[in-house]
Image (spheres, grey):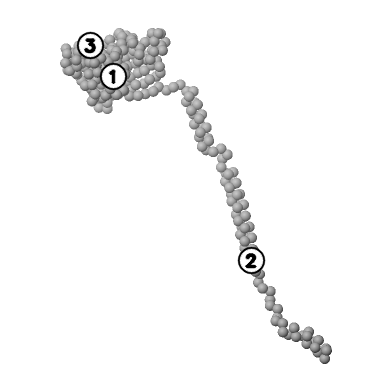
Amino acid sequence: MPKVDALRRFLLPCCNSTPTSPAPPAPLTISTKKRLSTSLRDDLDDSKQEKKFDEDQEDSYPTTPISTTNSTSSTSGAAISLSAPPRSSKTMVIGTIFGQRRGGHVWFCVQHDRLNTKPSLLLELSIPTTTLIQEMRCGLVRIALESSDSELNRCPLHSIPMWTLFCNGRKIGFAVRRRATQQTRIMLKTMQSMTVGAGVIPSGLVSGTESEEVLYMRANYECIIGGADSESFHLINPDEGPGQEFSIFLLRSK
């Protein structure tokens, strides 16, 4: 009897106990951790590849930027231009040649603005009006005004009071710098609306010229400043006008 009880106590737990279930699948956290680790590894690989790509790109670029090269070349160009001799400056002005028809001398007036009746330069030439008309019939007139006074070397070119006058290579007389009188300003005022043209101002229209008509030729001139000692004015012919070469040179010899 004691043996039966002992067997019962031994076998009863074995019969009543449920069979052991198979091992559960791996927890989700394990697979998740596995996926996370994979993604991190991929990210690390990607970052390495991007870093390598950036390094390759940096190696493919030149070490000196293009902008730096351009700035260097422009700087060197500026240095060259500074060392080069200065170029002559060009501008356009309005020039008027006028004089009395008979017994008068030629005047040359320069204006930067046709509405301003105060000219920037006004010269009275000793060449007679009739002589200039004869020279202009040849189609070429070159008037050279030369100053050789050593005392006026530092004086502005437009402030020189007297010049020696040459017309087409021949010494004719002198040219004197003048200030615009009231009569000259009235005459320029009558021509304010005109930039290019030639004609006659009737006698009596301008005060002081009652007994004589005034011939004039008004045109655009190209002013070329070669330096402190040279300046020239060159007539610009209109497209429909005849070819007339007319130039005035201001030269100071030292």
Which of disc 1 and disc 3 is earlier in sequence? 3
Q: Disc 1 designates what residue?
A: 118
Q: Disc 3 designates what residue?
A: 104
Q: Is residue 70 above or below residue 38?
A: above
The image shows residue 100 at horizontal and vertical percentages of 21, 13
Q: Is residue 27 above or below residue 157?
A: below
Q: Secondary structure at mark 2?
A: helix
Q: Quarter of the image holding residue 224?
A: top left
The image shows residue 241 at horizontal and vertical percentages of 25, 25
Q: What distance separates the C-alpha of mark 3 from that of mark 2?
A: 118 Å
Q: Nearer the viewer, residue 223 or 167?
A: 223
Task: Work out which residue is located at the far right of the displayed protein and give it.
Answer: 2
Q: Amino acid at mark 2?
A: Thr
* Residue found at x 22% / y 15%: 183
Which of disc 2 and disc 3 is earlier in sequence? 2
Q: Amino acid at mark 3?
A: Gly
Q: Quarter of the image holding residue 201?
A: top left
